[in-house]
Amino acid sequence: MVPTKALPQQLEETIRRANTILFKRGRSILIERDISALQFNALLTIREFGPLTMGDLCKHLFIACSTATDLADRMERSKLVERVRDEKDRRVVRMRLLPEGKEVLNEVIAERQTFMGEVLQDYTDVEYVELLRSLEILEQRMALK
């Protein structure tokens, strides 16, 4: 199938709206803990990629290094992350998740997954498998571009 101009637009809008709804589901937990969306995204990034240098964190979050330094300072004060020196090169400093940061991530993700479970209750097994398969294919193809 050759996508029309409307198809990518509809797909992007639908994914964006769904992401916004999902994002809002864990927001109350973040508000209770006084954690910003950017801090949460930083925690997710560190969890996904492992301990990161400030430069790497900037690249993943598309933010200026000065913003990342401020962000890291706030997250460190909140005991979400810690700065650790690289064992091989002591000049390199990486951000590493602390138990409190992991706990926040786990709470928010659990809330989102519970919500997804509620939404998917009305799906048939076939619809669920088709949806999951389509999303996995989309993710794989996007990663290749």
Image (cartoon, helix red, strand yellow):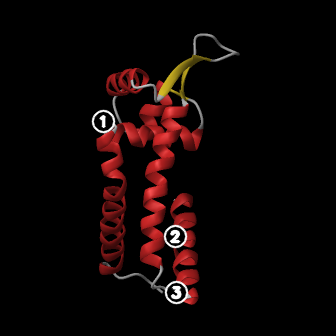
* Mark 1: amino acid: Asp
118 vs 130, left or right, is left
Is residue 82 toward the left or the right of residue 69 in the image?
Answer: right
Choose top left, top right, bottom left or bottom right for residue 98. Answer: top right
Q: CA distance from mark 2 to mark 3?
A: 16 Å
Q: Is residue 67 left or right of residue 79?
A: left
Is residue 78 positioned above or below 20 on the image?
Answer: above
Q: Nearer the viewer, residue 58 or 38?
A: 38
Query: Of the numbered discs in the image, which one, if any, rests on residue 138?
Result: 2
Which residue lies under the disc numbered 3? Answer: 127
**Observer-nearest of 43 and 89:** 43
* Camera-nearest residue between 23 and 118: 118
Residue 135 locus on image (x, y percent):
52, 72
Upstream in sequence: badge 2 or badge 3: 3
Q: Position of residue 137 (x, y in %)?
A: 57, 72
Residue 91 point in image, percent of width and height: 58, 11
| Mark 1 or 3: the one toward you | 1
The tag on residue 34 is 1
Residue at image point 37% right, 36% down: 39
